[in-house]
């Protein structure tokens, strides 16, 4: 899944700066803002900020209240549930399409990579080990998104993944613990994929994504 080409003009810069602040904790959940305040904070033209706010409202990271201002989204249970439901719909369809032309060798290779990463996390939670585990984690999900062969769906998935980053920041999930739990669940999905077992693969993926939602809300 390729990343979109960045817009380096004033509008793109305003969008990137405001979005970066949202995802990195630069604003409090529910905080009220104004166009003027954002323009001053990021030294961007008002028109560029206005355009960025429209884009970020479409991505469900901001809410615009006429005559009141701009509100940072609140990461409540509904926000988490909707993000996870969208992820489930997209990935299950990607899995279905992947299984139409299964690459069993690729699934087997990723299964071994995932097992190695999960085992490494048992005794080593240094940043490099966690990063390797997260890349192994992403590799499976990328297989499903790539199988869709849809730029539109890839873009929707990317935006939803950013919402999940926001959820992780708000709920302060421990990266090493989350990564290992996820990788162990991946092993069931990948084993079924290597055998081209549609029913078992779909059930294992749904169980993994539902478990991920529970982790995100601290259950």
Image (tube, rainbow, N blue to C red):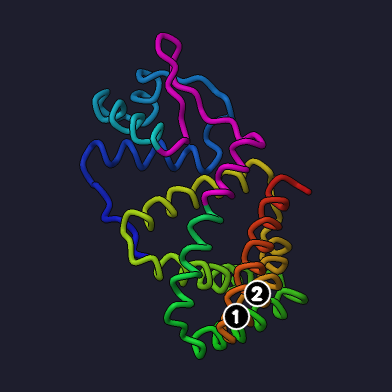
Taking 22 as reference, is 5 above or below it? Answer: below
* Residue topped by disc 1: 197
Residue at 57% x, 75% y is 198
* Residue topped by disc 2: 200
Residue closest to the eye, 84 or 12: 84
Residue closest to the eye, 60 or 51: 60
Give percent across and percent down for residue 88: 56, 56
Taking 34 as reference, is 41 above or below it? Answer: below
Q: Residue furthest left?
A: 9
Residue closest to the eye, 191 or 58: 191
Magenta region includes residue 76? yes
Q: What stretch is highlighted in magenta?
A: 59-86
Residue at 21% x, 42% y is 9
Q: Do the residues labelled 1 and 2 touch (CB within 8 Å)?
A: yes
Q: Is residue 52 left or right of residue 118?
A: left
Taking 140 as reference, is 106 above or below it? Answer: below
- Marks 1 and 2 sit apart, C-alpha to C-alpha, by 6 Å
Give percent across and percent down for residue 155: 36, 53
Q: In this view, does 85 lie to the left or right of 20?
A: right
Give percent across and percent down for residue 116: 66, 83
Q: In which quarter of the image is the N terminus?
A: bottom left
Say which element carries label 1: loop
Magenta region includes residue 101? no
């Amino acid at each position: 899944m390729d990343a979109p080409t960045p817009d380096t003009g004033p509008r793109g810069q305003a969008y990137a700066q405001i979005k970066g602040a949202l995802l990195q904790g630069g604003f409090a959940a529910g905080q009220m803002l104004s166009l003027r305040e954002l323009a001053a904070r990021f030294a961007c033209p008002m028109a560029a900020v206005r355009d960025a706010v429209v884009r970020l409202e479409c991505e469900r990271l901001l809410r615009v209240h006429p005559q009141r201002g701009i509100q940072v989204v609140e990461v409540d249970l509904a926000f988490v549930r909707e993000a996870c439901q969208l992820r489930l719909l997209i990935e299950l369809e990607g899995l279905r399409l992947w299984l139409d032309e299964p690459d069993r060798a690729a699934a087997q290779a990723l299964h071994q990579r995932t097992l190695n990463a999960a085992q490494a996390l048992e005794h080593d939670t240094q940043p490099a080990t966690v990063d390797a585990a997260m890349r192994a984690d992403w590799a499976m999900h990328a297989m499903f998104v790539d199988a869709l062969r849809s730029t539109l769906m890839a873009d929707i998935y990317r935006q939803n993944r950013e919402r999940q980053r926001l959820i992780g920041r708000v709920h302060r999930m421990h990266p090493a613990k989350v990564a290992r739990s996820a990788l162990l669940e991946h092993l069931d999905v990948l084993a079924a994929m290597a055998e081209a077992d549609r029913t078992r693969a779909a059930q294992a993926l749904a169980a993994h994504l539902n478990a991920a939602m529970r982790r995100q809300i601290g259950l």
